[in-house]
Image: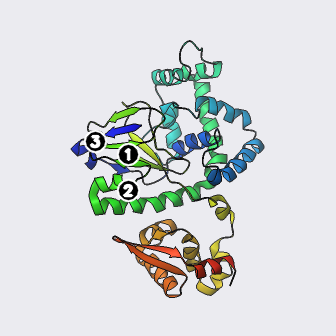
Amino acid sequence: MLRIHFGTEDLNRLRVAARPDPLWEIVLSLHLLQNRQAALVFDPWRREVRAGLVRAGLTETVAALHRLCPWADYFPDFLTPGQGIDDLETGLDRVLSSPIRRLGREISLLYPGTRPLPPGARSLAAGQPQALAGLGEALRRFHAVAVEPYTGEIRAAVAADRPVRAEAALDAGPSGLLASYEPELTWRGDHLEAAYPMDSELVLDGRALTLIPAFFCVRNPVALADPELPPVLVHPLTPAPGWLARSRATNPSELPVAQLIGPTRATVLDALERPLTTTQLGAALRLTLSTASRHATVLRESGLITSERRGSAVVHTRSRLGDALMDGRL
């Protein structure tokens, strides 16, 4: 169990990263290639990425990255620097600028006891320029195959999640924001709990906690191993099964239905395959709130979606008629 302890002022310092962090997505996707978690959601991605890594000649490179970043209770914190860096090159600069003492300490934790460091890990732990350059290139090339092609889906998922957190914070303040992360996180009034592979206590003690949404995070949130580092908590976005197939499908604006209801409304109807609030819909499709509301009204009056008020938000869902129209079954 992970417990994050808050003081009164710590709640007011909470922040949520606005965009995905490519270094966290790299690390978490490396983990997904070492396990079978969320098979229904991520197995199509695993097959596609593994084939792409073979074509790119990166099999041995990824094996080395797996040794440095194992799917285990511990992996080095220096691989995920900062508090939600949204630019790959900026993040890589931070990784490769890690102090030598930190590199040595964190890499040595991968080989506890009397186990000697392998030559490659020893060179990296010593901060040798050639080893650091090799790490940077390996991370960059892995990102190009395993993360970058899916940037659209990752950004859309983050954009859909952010309004949910904003609405919770506006309705009930910082406590409401933390409560909105259930069931992955549980707010106990003075501390936050999450399932974790080990017992861990993190006292914020006046430091701002950054919540980072991650597409490739599965099941449980992830925190840094070193409690002295600026605190972050990475949480899963939980994409729906079939996300990869849908992303490969024809652009909704190019479907025959677009000739009937227009390309923008066809895109809105496609997005409402899963329930979304008006705010989430606008964020996911980069529409203003008034535009998203207007399109939803037209689709609802046509019987293609249903709308239900939940608290201060209106949640829209595609109707059976809308499903039939999108699937070409009318």
Which sits earlier in the primary sequence, circle 1 or circle 2?
Answer: 2
The image position of residue 104, as x and y in percent, is 50, 21
Q: Are marks 1 and 2 in contact (CB under 8 Å)?
A: no
Alpha-carbon span between mark 3 and mark 2:
17 Å
Q: Residues within 10 Å of mark 2 (few under 14, many from 20)?
A: many
Q: Residue at x 53, y 54 (%)?
A: 238
The image position of residue 208, as x and y in percent, is 31, 43
Q: Residue at x 50, y 66 (%)?
A: 284
Is residue 258 depicted above or below 160 in this figure? below
Colouring chosen for the image of the structure: rainbow
Residue 2: quarter of image: top left
Tag 2 residue: 180
Q: Are marks 3 and 1 in contact (CB under 8 Å)?
A: no
Q: Amino acid at mark 1?
A: Thr
Alpha-carbon span between mark 1 and mark 2:
15 Å
Eye-nearest disc, 3 or 1: 3
Tag 3 residue: 6
Q: Residue at x 75, y 46 (%)?
A: 51
